[in-house]
Amino acid sequence: DVVTSQSVIDEMDSDLLKDVPTSTRIIRSYGLTPSSLRNYAISSLEKNPTSRFYNYLFKVLIKLRDLSFLPDAYILWVPSTIKSVKFLIQDRRDSVIFSSVPIYTNAVGGYMVSRLFNLPLVLDFRDTWVDDPYINLPTSFHKRINIWLESKVFNHASLILVYSDWAKRVYREKYPNK
């Protein structure tokens, strides 16, 4: 069984579903996401694409988003995901939480679900978290919170999968017991 977020639906390749066994239940978790805000902003810009006001407003909204949400702007879908997982596992105790992490909210959501339902957590990281050289956290407060979140999630996980030898070295140094 699979729980997926709404943000994945916009970019989903439906041909991939043919490889999923027909007995697999796919439950969509919905929440306010940057995609929905972006789509609203783009539709507004399309009405008057040369408007400096809309360009300015869009930049301000992006900045507010980056300052407001931790670990990232997708955190608002976690409550819906918890509700979906509760429905999914209500009669099953043979479950494991597998969290694919292209965005860090997935790690936090997986951690929360794992703790709430006392299930093992497997994390599949695409990129490093606070050590990612391409991540620009807006303030030192954001950096401290992300370091704390990464530590909580990593120390709780039963298994951590990473994409490269470099990431493996980084995390082995930081979390030698994992």
Image (cartoon, rainbow, N blue to C red):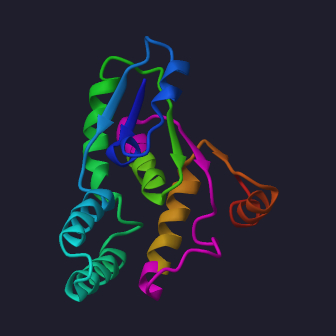
- From the top left corner, tell me how far across and down residue 90 is, in percent: 30, 23
- From the top left corner, tell me how far across and down residue 59 is, in percent: 32, 82
Q: Is residue 147 left or right of residue 77?
A: right
- From the top left corner, tell me how far across and down residue 29 is, in percent: 29, 40
- From the top left corner, tell me how far across and down residue 37 is, in percent: 25, 63
Q: Is residue 94 left or right of residue 5?
A: right
Of residues 162 and 17, the one drawn nearer to the viewer in this rendering: 17
Q: Residue at x 37, y 69 (%)?
A: 70
Which quadrant of the view contains residue 166?
bottom right
Q: Is residue 77 left or right of residue 127?
A: left
Q: Residue at x 37, y 41 (%)?
A: 9
Which quadrant of the view contains residue 28?
top left
Residue 96 sits inside the magenta stretch: no
114 over 144 or under it: above or below: above
Of residues 15 and 102, the one drawn nearer to the viewer in this rendering: 15
Q: Is residue 21 left or right of residue 45?
A: right
Q: Which residues are magenta?
A: 113-142
Q: Residue at x 50, y 30 (%)?
A: 96
The residue most toward the top is: 23
Which quadrant of the view contains residue 145?
bottom left
Question: Number of labelled discs?
Answer: 0
Q: Quadrant of the N terminus?
A: top left
Q: Residue at x 53, y 45 (%)?
A: 100
Residue 120 sits inside the magenta stretch: yes
103 over 146 or under it: above or below: above
98 over 139 or under it: above or below: above
